[in-house]
Amino acid sequence: MSTKRSPKLNLVVAVCNNGGIGKDGQLPWRLKKDMEFFKKITTQTKDNGKQNAVVMGRKTWLSIPEKFRPLANRINIILSTTIDPFDGVYVAKSLDEAITMVTGNGVLADKVEGVHIIGGSSVYKAALESDFACRIYLTRVLAEFDCDTFLPEFNQNVFKKIDNCEDVPKGKMNDKNIDFVFEVYDKMFL
């Protein structure tokens, strides 16, 4: 029987210099090492009998190429009031409802190890403003791109940069003449 636990939310996001995270429902860049890191972070578990949940909004779900939906080896949860659940995908009306699904006596509580928020902007905002513990895995793309979707600002007094996070690549990287770095931030409760 599961006991009620408060999960740590892991936000996984890539953001460019002007705060952009998307354009016309797509990533404005394609960085192979970032996609590999995203896959590793969202699939890797300590318990082989469990998977991580990836929680996303409807637009993020639709932005994933159809051949990759649902994201393999992860429990996919879409936040939507217009989509009905279907094979391999769970639907929740809010972030709180999704968290209820994966905790306590929730339908997925015994199957989920970690909870990863993968977009879009309003889902990131709900997670950042929640009372849950949060870690942000941020790929900082060191360039500006034309974007129409942005990462909500997060309070640097509440979220502190962690410099010695294991399993996170260190230093500046380059892919297709685009520089980027991986950063990790943890919410500090004052």
Image (tube, rainbow, N blue to C red):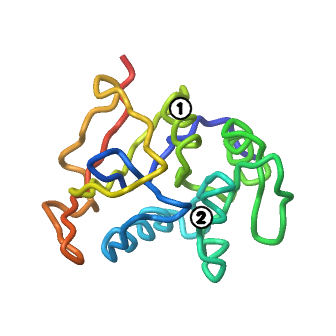
Dot 1 crowding, Cα within 10 Å, few <14, some 14–19, many 20+: some
Q: Which amino acid does label 2 sit on?
A: Gln
Percent across and percent down for residue 128 are 48, 34
- Front-most of residues 35 and 25: 25
Residue found at x 21% / y 68%:
178
Circle 1/circle 2 CB separation < 8 Å: no
> Where on the picture, by quarter, is residue 169?
bottom left
Percent across and percent down for residue 33 are 30, 73
Residue found at x 28% / y 62%:
167
Q: In this view, does 146 lie to the left or right of 66?
A: left
* Mark carried by residue 55: none
> Where on the picture, by quarter, is residue 105?
top right
* Mark carried by residue 51: 2
Of callouts 1 and 2, the N-terminal one: 2
Q: In this view, does 32 lie to the left or right of 57?
A: left
Q: Is residue 154 left or right of residue 4?
A: left
Identify the secondary structure beneath mark 1.
Answer: loop
Residues under labels 1 and 2: Cα distance? 20 Å
Q: Which residue lies furthest to the left in this view?
A: 171
Q: Which residue lies furthest to the top in this view?
A: 190
| Image height of 39 relative to 84, above or below | below
Dot 2 crowding, Cα within 10 Å, few <14, some 14–19, many 20+: many
Position of the C terminus, as image quadrant, is top left
Residue found at x 76% / y 47%:
92
Q: Residue furthest bottom?
A: 67
* Mark carried by residue 132: 1
Residue found at x 45% / y 70%:
39
Percent across and percent down for residue 189 are 39, 22
Identify the secondary structure beneath mark 2.
Answer: strand
